[in-house]
Amino acid sequence: MPSDSISQSLPVAGIESLRPLLLGTRHMAVAGHYSAAHAAFAVLESGGNAVDAGVAAGIALGVLQSDLVNVAGVAPIMIYRADKRDVLTISGLGAWPRAVTPDFFQKRHGGKIPEGILRTVVPAAPDAWITALENYGTMSFGDCAAAAIRFASAGFPMYGLMSDMIAMHAADYARWPSSAAIYLPNGRPPRRGEIFVQVDLGRTLQYMADQERSAGVKGRAAGLKAARDAFYRGDIARAIVAYHKANGGLITAQDLDDFRVAIEPPVKTRFAGIDMYACGAWCQGPVLPQMLGMLNGIDLKRMGHNSLDYAHRLTETIKLAFADRERYYGDPRFVNVPIETLLSDAYVETRRAMVRPDRAWPQMPPYGEISGFASRSAPVPTLESAAVGAHDTSYICVMDKDGNVFSATPSDPSYDTPVIPGTGLCPSSRGSQSWAEPAHASSVAPGKRPRLTPSPALAILPDGSPMPLGTPGGDVQAQAVLQVFLNMTVFDMNPQQAVEAPRFASYSFPDSFEPHSYSPGVLHVESRVPQSVRSGLAARGHKVEDWPDFVWRAGAVCVLRADRSQGVISAGADPRRPCYAVGW
């Protein structure tokens, strides 16, 4: 048959997504950097389970994205165990040092939590990774850290987003010689394609692996304990404590030695026959089930994807949930968080009724009134730009051949606190997500955890199949995950189409990061949303600010979805950042 006849017989259609939908039948991983996804896949191929692979990718992200993720940062984790059909969480979030008092920053820093080591909370990620391996994994820390050690010691090619991020914060890195030596080599930010090496970070990880190997003759558990002790009691701990002591920091050997992450049950809601699980109110996790609760029973499909009514409804729902986050969320060990009420049908009905179909709340809506909780005054707007935001994060999810699932959101930037000399580490600066005001639910207190933005998610579909998803993006995280989840479950998009679809994000509430800027009514919208919709949103009172067609600030959602009837796993990897999926 002539070639022109062949071409005439084929259907003429555009591509369904910028990247192809990746499908597999055995195991698959998606991560915020392509090399981290490969690290996870290598572990799966060598016989590791989803937890082993997820830990490998998570540690690798602390090297490959060390501008946004720190090996000594935070790492909230969700795990689905296929044999038990249950979901659990590992908090992966550190606490304020004992030396901090509730009025510490009010008395000494004018009510601000300054950049630098004073915002350091106990690093949680190393303990989170090791706790996951100890309880649910099969491999050693050294095996799971092998890729990260190689990426740090031998280097990796610098890529666009990281190069741009370091350049954006070059003056911040220059404040500390130990940070400038790594992130401003030759006195400038590394350029795209240059090999970026983090020798000290490689040595730190290798030291933990070596300590594990030495103790491993007594068994796997003894080896993992030795790796943990290397960080929280050994040379790494001593270096952190010595630097804090010499530079006015507050972390002590006791703070590190006593720290343990918690294994906790998730919170959940049910939406259209789907169970959505999230981490507890020590992070912003519950806003996702809160938003889904408010959207239950509304015919979103009839509205049409990203139509004016749909975008308005979601935006107002987001604002209502985030108002409750501002009022009630905090470390449940210190704060009475009425989470059962916030997720109850009766409560979400009262909040749902506050959405006005033709008019936006010009600011953050009022907090929900709950019996036994005092009223609070509304936050004061600022003139700071909402476009700054997002100190950022990354994400990894893995599904193995047995159906186990790992979902984690490791984080912590390196430009707002110094590198501890000789370690390559920036111990968690997540104190930036506390408030200096003692009356705030997420106020500073000794041993208290800040209210974390990183918040992985995990859904169980009506047929029992797990679906992990998550994203970086600070306060945008839950908003982006909500939209991608609805893209798949309401509008029948496949995972890749769902993550590529245009998004919007509200900033009409206090930012989670110090100085907690608040821009009432501001709504950022990617320009692929039709102009008629953007104009209609503005007419309803939203302060619409256009984003480019694809923008990294809109998040970078990764998702895996299993189809039990077909035995197929599908993956979505957001092209807004260097996310990729690997599997077969």
Image (spheres, rainbow, N blue to C red):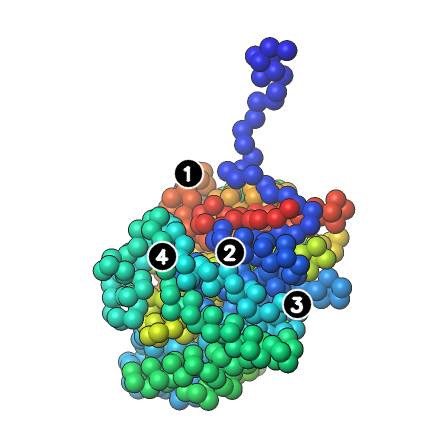
Can you identify the residue that label 1 sits on? 531
Q: Where is residue 258 in the image (x, y as percent from the top left)?
A: 51, 86
- SS of the residue under disc 4: strand
Q: Which of marks 3 and 1 is nearer the N terminus?
A: 3
Disc 2 residue type (three-letter): Ala
Disc 3 residue type (three-letter): Thr
Q: Is residue 252 left or right of residue 142?
A: left
Residue at the location (35% across, 74% down)? Answer: 422
Residue at the location (45% across, 79% down)? Answer: 122
| Labels 4, 2: front one | 4
Observer-nearest residue: 236 or 461? 236
Q: Alpha-carbon distance for marks 4 and 1? A: 41 Å
Q: Which of marks 4 and 2 is nearer the N terminus?
A: 2
How crowded is the residue under tag 3: few (<14 C-alpha within 10 Å), some, or many (20+)?
some
Say the numbered circle drawn on residue 138.
3
Q: Where is residue 70 in the image (x, y as percent from the top left)?
A: 43, 67
Q: Earlier in the sequence, mark 4 or mark 1?
A: 4
Q: Do the residues labelled 4 and 2 touch (CB within 8 Å)?
A: no
Can you identify the residue that label 2 sits on? 36
Disc 4 residue type (three-letter): Phe
Q: Alpha-carbon distance for marks 4 and 3? A: 31 Å
How crowded is the residue under tag 4: few (<14 C-alpha within 10 Å), some, or many (20+)?
many
Q: Do the residues labelled 2 and 1 touch (CB within 8 Å)?
A: no
